[in-house]
Amino acid sequence: MAPDEAALESASLEPATLRKRARFHPLAVREVRRLTEDSIEVTFAVPVEFAGEYDYAPGQYLALRKELNGRELRRSYSICAAPLPGELRVAIKRDLGGEFSTWANESLTAGTVIDVMSPQGTFTTQLAPVSGGESGERDTDRHYAAIAAGSGITPVMALARTLLASSPNTRFSLVYSNRTAQDVMFLEELAELKDRYPSRFALFHVLTRERRVSDVLSGRLDAERLHVFLEHLVRPQDVDEWFICGPFELVQLVRDTLEEAGVDRKHVRFELFTTDRPDRPEGQHGRPVVVDESEGVHTINFTLDGVSATVTTALHSRETVLNAALRVRSDVPFACAGGVCGTCRAKLVAGTVDMDENYALEPEELERGYVLTCQSHPTSDAVTVNYDS
């Protein structure tokens, strides 16, 4: 079920619209395909009237919204296919205790309608296409590398498919870690990519609970094993851009290891699905807060879709800007509420905030005054943020 190669070659790599306004629309599921025992690929049909809302760059994600057991749940899943008109594909892996992912793997079928947010995220190439001369061809010698674990392969699939098809000499190296061969998502698709681009796609499967022919491919992807990869198989000096996606611990380890190897962090993209912080619930919102004006409050002003609103929050509550805003406007954008996805990003126009965590904003965005409202607590009497900036 590989995408049409001609369509891939015409897919745009321009990363321009990565921060479009997050809006939900109801989309019907066209197909549900089993990937592994615990994961599925879900294809959504995109009607012509919504086509502009769902343009995306490879590596971006979708937030899905569904009411289950009387509660609204929002979960984010990366798009796993190169951009094709009329459809979106995401992969959903069952998480231990995950209410939404369990329901999807057990009950989701073609025809089901789910609210789908317009694509978000910046886990995509930041390298502008380079002209190859008067012919207008893209540059032909870029080398991209990715290190992924488990369901972290999802956005990498979209990136690899698109980048390899974009130029006849582009190279892509992938180190992919799983527990066993049966846990490997997109196993056949990866093999097809290897067959299609044998000299340009380097694929290294690392299994933590199965013995492989090589020691470097057997066992946990720890610092020692990473150093072997970087010294002998994927040399940092030969790579133009890196992509890391997986558990928090692995992402941090790889980033630190690459930095030790002399890789500039501006050439490293990373994405987390969770923060591995069980004390910080994700996807929850609208926490009840009792505001007593006599005890002192913070005033939060925010603008969304050109409309301004004001809400107050008790000084002692340590309520986030997002939580407060949701109490007066239910359409304030958010997905994970854990500081990971960046959907709730807004520009701090006035006042000061304390931001607990940030796994989504780049240093340049922080310098321009952007904050994650799901992690931001007011520290001044009044705070003003703009979601439209």
Image: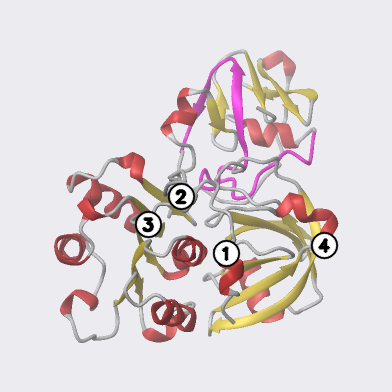
Decide which of tag 1 and tag 2 comes sooner along the chain: 1
Q: Name the residue under label 4.
A: 47
| Camera-nearest residue between 275 and 268 | 268
Note whether 233 is above or below 190 in the view shown. Answer: above
Provide residue 372's location: percent of width, then percent of height. Answer: 56, 35
In the picture, the quarter occupied by the C terminus is top right
Note whether 321 is above or below 61 in the view shown. Answer: above
Q: Name the residue under label 2.
A: 125
Give how far apart the Cα atoms at labels 2 and 4 are. Answer: 27 Å
Q: Are marks 3 and 4 in contact (CB under 8 Å)?
A: no
Provide residue 204's location: percent of width, then percent of height. Answer: 30, 74
- The residue under the point 65% across, 35% down is 322
Give the residue type at disc 1. Ala
Q: Name the residue under label 1.
A: 82
Q: In this view, does 30 lie to the left or right of 232?
A: right
Query: Residue 140, labelled with which disc?
Result: 3
Q: In this view, does 73 lie to the left or right of 28?
A: left
Label 4's element? loop
| Camera-nearest residue between 69 and 95 | 95
